[in-house]
Amino acid sequence: MPASVKKMVTQPSKMPAFSQIIEQLVSSPLLKPFVLSLIILASTIFLIKRLFATSVSHKKLPPSPSKVPIIGHLHKLGRYPHLSLQKLSQKYGPIMLLRLGSVPTLVVSSAEAAQEIMKTHDLAFADRPRSKINEKMLYNYKDLATAPYGEYWRQMKSICVVQLLSNKRVYDTRKVRENETALLVKKIAETSNSVVDLSDLLMAYTNDIISLSAFGRRFSEGESGWQLRRLMKDMISLLGGFDVGTYIPQLAWLSTVMGFYTKVDAVAKEVDEFLEKLIDEHIHTSKRAKAEGSEDFVDVLLEIYNDKSITGFSIDRESIKAIVLDILAAGTDTTFTVLEWAMTELLRHPQGEHLDMTETTGFTNHKKEHLLAVATPYSI
Ligand code: HEM
């Protein structure tokens, strides 16, 4: 593996939080006077607008902390938004309204309130907010996660549910998960006398399970494996990063000046080249894979691409790339984060007595013991 690649893998790019961006700007001798006068000008316009506003909204809105012109409540998120939001919700209740710049955002923090939003008012909250990052990274909202609610989303969802994640296909890939889990435990056991970077191992483990199921190939090793892991880290960091323009359209130019969109374009281009190569390779091997019964997600998507009678609608090459990206991004980071969190908790409380996993995941005691075995290889 080339050293440059390793450096990029072990030092993933991190998007700065809003407070860090402001700190950088205000401390830059070149931009300082410009940014300050811009903020003063924008605040003045905002105050004048409010002063002369003729219609007063009488809508009953959820409780909300006091806000600052232009940035709204962005400054309240701090370096650790989950902790700040928890603190705020203790004061303002399980449903509170925050303004992230100009974007009204409902923060829901109880099971009952979440049920109201996700079930009772599902349709009203079905769409995800639009953003330039999603537009550029996810093929103009052609993936399942960001596609607006409608016919296209329904078609993509049915492909995922019926063709890719059906009971049969999940059962067919069971061997992959069992083998990878056994391999992970073996790797940890082998390093029992030295320090283990569990985060790194878990990331590779989830990546391998998803990539074996999606493209029939392990990606934790070799040059293409390092490239995929670096791309995934970059992509997830950009998708979860802070784009000033999304929240404060008046300051969208800052994203350009700070090179944010250049970075997004570069990662999107590299991801696209990676997926194009993957699809080309599968076009040559998919017939054999079908005959051998070893089809992966890309093979199935190509079959639908070639024969629209399978689903009753056609998909194009961009849709294939967008769905593969969804599966990769949605399936790797989520599973990895849950596992990393569970391992941290188990290391903090080795007996696992306070972890009631049966409640949230339906884990049986047998599986819980298995997890404990992974977390504490020395004591088993
Ligand atoms: C512990 C693991 C996981 C967690 C906690 C998790 C959580 C979530 C959540 C909260 C959503 C949003 C649901 C909504 O907006 O209604 C979601 C959506 C999604 N997840 Fe997962 N997920 C996990 C694993 C996976 C895996 C393994 C895959 C793929 C193999 C996956 C694929 C997706 C996709 C494609 C969506 C978008 C669905 C849509 O917008 O219709 N997720 N996930």
Image (tube, rainbow, N blue to C red):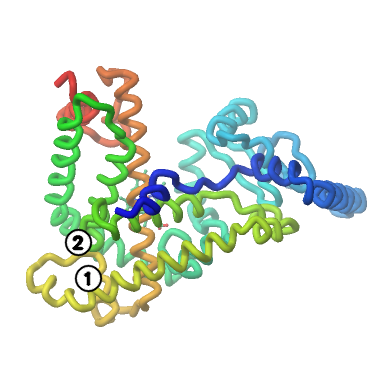
Where does residue 377 sit, x and y in percent of width and height? 18, 25
| Residue drawn at the location 67% of the way across and 42% of the way down | 74
How would you rate the neighbour count of disc 2 (Cα within 10 Å): few for under 14, some for 14-19, many for 20 or more? many
Residue at screen point 23% across, 33% down: 363
Q: Which residue is mark 1?
A: 299
* Residue under the point 62% across and 35% down: 78
Q: What amino acid is at disc 2?
A: Gly
Where on the picture, by quarter, is residue 167? bottom left
Q: Is residue 176 left or right of residue 57?
A: left
Are discs 2 and 1 less than 8 Å apart at CB?
yes
Residue 86 on image: x %, y %: 55, 30
Query: Most extreme residue toward the left, as rendered?
Result: 292
User: Along the horizontal axis of the image, is 31 left or right of 287?
Assistant: right
Location of residue 272 with respect to 371 vertically, above or below: below
Q: Quadrant of the C terminus?
A: top left
Q: What distance separates the C-alpha of mark 2 from that of mark 1?
A: 9 Å
